[in-house]
Every structure is written in structure tokens, then in C-alpha cells.
Image (cartoon, rainbow, N blue to C red):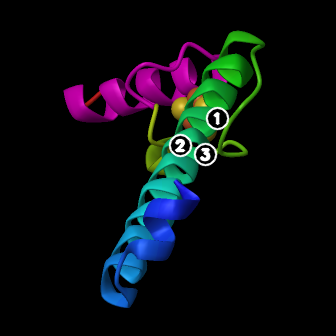
Amino acid sequence: MRESLRRASVPARRQLITRLLRNASLAVLGLAGGAVAVKRRRLLREGKCLNQGGCRDCGVFGDCGLPRALSTRSVLARIRDGQ
Ligand code: SF4
């Protein structure tokens, strides 16, 4: 690898380094996204709220089974039905 890098031209080395950095940053972003998704799933499984009770703006409102979300859905359904 070192010998091939030494022989490579400067633009080729730059391109290689750029690609390596780009791929490394994409990998880091992917891992960070995966970690956030796993953490959200774990918190929901443990019964902890992700959004400190702001259910209507929460990204998981449709699937959330926490009491506050169930209550909010019930209230919204009653409002929609005009009760
Ligand atoms: S939907 Fe509501 S209760 Fe569920 S995680 Fe989001 S904010 Fe918390």
C-alpha cells in the first residue's frame, strides 16, 4: 500500500484520501443514526417518553403505547368525533 501510494500522483493520492474520509464520515453518520434508533427503541421499551410529553409533535406518536400518547389519541379521537 505504501509503495503504491508513493508511486501514485498527488491528485490520485488526494482523491484516495478524499474517498477514505468521505467513506469514514458516512460510516460514522450511519453508526450514529443506528445508535439513535436503537436508543429510541430501548427508551420506548422501558416506558420512557422520548419527547417529554409533547405527543402531537412526536415522531413516534402513531406507534407509541405510553399512557400519555394513548390519552392524547383518545382525546383527539373524541374531538374529531365531536363528543
Ligand atoms: S408519543 Fe408522547 S408519550 Fe410517546 S414518546 Fe412521544 S411524546 Fe412521549
Q: Residue 64 magenta-drawn?
A: yes
Q: CA distance from mark 3 to mark 2?
A: 4 Å
Question: Gap in Å between the C-alphas at discs 1 and 3?
Answer: 5 Å
- Residue 48: quarter of image: top right
Q: Kindly give the residue lying farthest to the bottom in the view shown.
A: 10
Secondary structure beneath dot 2 equals helix
Three-letter amino acid code at disc 1?
Ala
- Which residue is depicted at the point 43% across and 25% down? 73
- Taking depth in this image into account, of 58 and 45 the one nearest to the observer is 45
Residue 79 point in image, percent of width and height = 32, 35
Residue sitting nearer the eye, 73 or 26:
26
In the rendered structure, find residue 33 and report the number of the disc placed on it: 2
Identify the image quadrant of residue 4.
bottom left
Residue type, label 3 = Ala
Rendering coords of residue 7 (x, y %): 41, 74
Classify mark 1: residues with Cα within 10 Å, few (<14), some (14-19) or many (20+).
Answer: few
**Position of residue 12 in the picture relative to residue 31 (left or right):** left
Q: Which residue is mark 1?
A: 35
* Residue at the outermost left position: 81
Where is residue 50 drawn, in percent x and y? 67, 37
Where are the magenta residues, as a range? 61-81
Residue wearing tag 3: 32
In front of the other: 71 or 40: 40
**Secondary structure type for disc 1:** helix
x 45%, y 31%: residue = 61
**Is disc 3 surrounded by few (<14), some (14 to 19) or many (20+) residues within 10 Å?**
few
Q: Are marks 3 and 2 in contact (CB under 8 Å)?
A: yes
Q: CA distance from mark 1 to mark 2?
A: 5 Å
Q: Quadrant of the C terminus?
A: top left
* Proximity of marks 1 and 2: CB atoms separated by less than 8 Å: yes
Task: Find out if the beta carbon at label 1 lies less than 8 Å from the nearest ligand 1 atom.
Answer: no
Q: Position of residue 17 (x, y in %)?
A: 47, 72
